[in-house]
Amino acid sequence: MRLLLSLLRPSYGQKLFLLATLPLLLAVAAISVLVANQSRQLAEREIRALESQLIEAKKAELKNYISIARTAFVNIYGRAAPDDDQAKLSVTQILSSMLYGQDGYFFVFDYEGTNLVSPRQTYLIGKNWRGLTDLNGTEITDPLIQIARSGGGYHSFDWTKPSTNETARMVTYAVGLQDWQWVVGTGVFIDDVLESVAAARADVEERVQRTSFYILVITVAALLLVFFSGFVITVRERRLADTKLKALTQRVFDAQEEERGRVARELHDGISQLLVGVRYALDSARRRVKSGDERGLQSLEKGIDHLSGAIQEVRRISRDLRPGVLDDLGLGPALKVLTDEYAARTGIEVDFQTVVFRNRLDQESKIALYRIAQEALTNVERHSGASKVTMDLRGHKSGATLRIADNGCGLPQDAPPSERGGLGLRNMQERVEQLEGTLRIFSSRTGTVIVAEVPLSHILPPESEGTDNSRKARA
């Protein structure tokens, strides 16, 4: 009875627990659904790509088989007349004897639909099969004749597998012997591909269920942690944590809004204008083409040039958001690309120097140092009025150091120390602190120097000699 009353009238601690757990449960449920859907979609795309690759390999194999068959009878066919029955008999004998694997064979139809060669299913020979369909209603003979008349191509349908007498999916490739009005083709069963795809889908579903179970376990553990921490953490400490969380959230929102604003400006100032130019050029080309004006081609080419510029602009924005060279080649080459593009775009001279690392920076350090360099160059462009920037990256016994210096006007000296650094400098400081490193800023009226140091713990030990020689150029 007391337990029931306590549930109906929860205490302050229980209310806090409920307030903490309900959003957590809703968030976990939403995350679980999102993760499951995203996993299924990603896996489905990969499975479809795999299925397409396997089927394309089968199709290429069929082309090779047809090439081999044509090589076997090309001399006979090339010398024979359209009504040379002896030559036709010789070709049918050659094709009938060309068997491969458990189910591979060549078939021949004439353009009237009469089967001439079918070594593994001889009951088909001599009969007219125009209008033949599989169990799903897919036409078989008529499309093959049409494909042969047009030169050659692929056709898929369900067919009886000779080795098992079971129906399976078959991909065929047929070509036409136009002088004899024959369809010559061969096929391969892809039931093994379909089975592999089905097994992959089942494996994905199992992994999704396993992931959902792990999320459930983590959720239960988190609930228990929240419950027990409620007895330990005081209300005052929670208030302080909430205050810090709000401040941090606001800073994250500020960073997000600034980044969204930057991307929006680049989209509006760059891509939007280019696309408007494309639209204008295409409209002009359409009007000139309709009116018979020969300058329509020039307008069309101008629109294509604008479209190419838009594509390049999209690629540049994509590289700014996440440069692929950072993952592929390492920090040194990524910074080299960054400084070269920066110098070409702004006209500010950039002198970049680095020393080949025998050890390699871990992923977190590479991203952090790259973003620090990116933020520093942005600040130089926006605020410093500098004409030259020097950037130096090197490793040493204590870790790794990135030094960036400019000859600009420096940070405002009359502002309070807490206000001298904007959001960009705070982001640099937080990135370095997460790596347990140090960030030093030296500023005067003759320029600013930023030194970011990463401790030795973030430099990976040397790899084996064989792999180290091939990767030592990566920072």
Image (cartoon, helix red, strand yellow):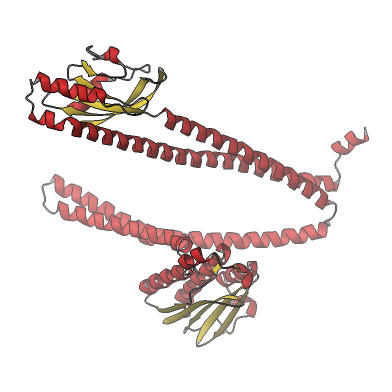
For residue 159, side relative to residue 378 (left or right): left
Where does the image place residue 33, in percent across and percent down from the top left? 60, 39
Quadrant assignment, res 35: top right
Front-lying residue, 354 or 94: 94
- Work out whether 174 lies above or below 428: above
In this rendering, the answer to whether 24 lies above or below 304 is above
Say which quadrant the N terminus sits in: top right
Q: Is residue 209 left or right of residue 308?
A: right
In the displayed structure, would residue 410 be above or below residue 265? below
Please tell me in which quadrant of the rendered image residue 212 appears.
top right
In the rendered view, does 119 fall on the left or right side of 180?
right
Specify whether 130 is left or right of 241: left
Give the residue drawn at x 88%, y 38%: 6
Q: 241 or 39, which lies in front? A: 39
> Can residue 273 be seen from the camera position used here?
no
The percent coordinates of residue 229 (x first, y second) are: 81, 52
Q: Nearer the viewer, residue 364 or 240?
A: 364
Task: Give the tally of numbered discs.
Answer: 0
Residue 252 x/y as whole percent: 60, 60
Residue 182, relative to residue 396: is it above or below?
Answer: above
Q: Quadrant of residue 3?
A: top right
Q: Is residue 103 visible?
A: yes
What's the residue at 29%, 12% (across, down)? 123
Q: Position of residue 441 (x, y in %)?
A: 58, 80
Residue drawn 63% across the image and 38% down it: 210
